[in-house]
Amino acid sequence: MKNINDFDTGVALIMGMLYENFPIPIDIKTSEIPELNIKEDDSDIREKGERWSELSRIYYYSAIFLLEEGYIRGERVKGYIVLNNCCLTSKGLAALQQIPEFMKSKKAIGEWFSQLGKESVKDITIDGIKAAVSMALHGS
């Protein structure tokens, strides 16, 4: 289940970055995606090279999933864990503009996702991320 949790986290962070920059395309370098303020087994993920490398790969394939499912546009860079010129598609934007009932702040999912990598966000839970990702990708 750890890969699924990491996938959900990656989807939320990637879509949040794209939502924040929409409609301007950005390059996604998965090794530079900020880690969340979620308590992990590792106190400092960057110092744990193996775990950082694992997250980087999972986030990359999360981005590839979003690309192949039509939520984002972008170009793969052969030999690198990077996607260039990424932007939300209309499908991705519509998914992120939903306002879930379970969110107390009544913000769109995209606004919430765009705040995930920021230090100002406290008490983020994996369950909250999973629920928001599920609604964004499946509408439920």
Image (spheres, rainbow, N blue to C red):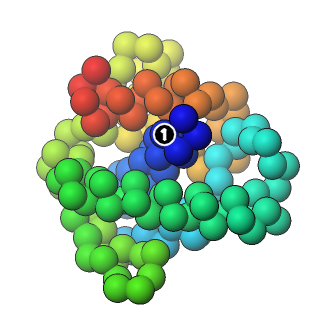
The residue drawn where x is 43% and y is 70% is 28
Camera-side residue of 118 and 15: 15
Q: In this view, does 128 lie above or below 38?
A: above
Q: Residue 23, can we see it?
A: no
Could you say which quadrant of the image residue 91 lies in?
top left
The residue at the far bottom in this view is 79
1 or 136: nearer the viewer = 1
Quadrant of the rendering where the N terminus is positioned: top right
State left or right for residue 54 relative to residue 123: left
- Give whichever of 128, 103 is nearer the camera: 128
State left or right for residue 77 relative to residue 7.
left
Q: Is residue 111 above or below residue 103?
A: below
Residue at (35% x, 85% y) in the render: 78
Q: Position of residue 102 (x, y in %)?
A: 44, 14
Q: Which amino acid does label 1 sit on?
A: Ile
Quarter of the figure with the C terminus: top left
Which residue is drawn at the image coordinates 48% and 50% (left, top)? 10
Residue labelled with disc 1:
4
**Secondary structure of residue under mark 1:** helix
Q: Residue at x 36, y 73 (%)?
A: 83
- How far across and how far down the image is residue 122, in percent? 69, 33
Q: In this view, does 10 lie to the left or right of 136?
A: right
Q: Percent from the top left, x then y, of residue 94? A: 20, 39
The residue closer to the viewer here, 9 or 23, is 9
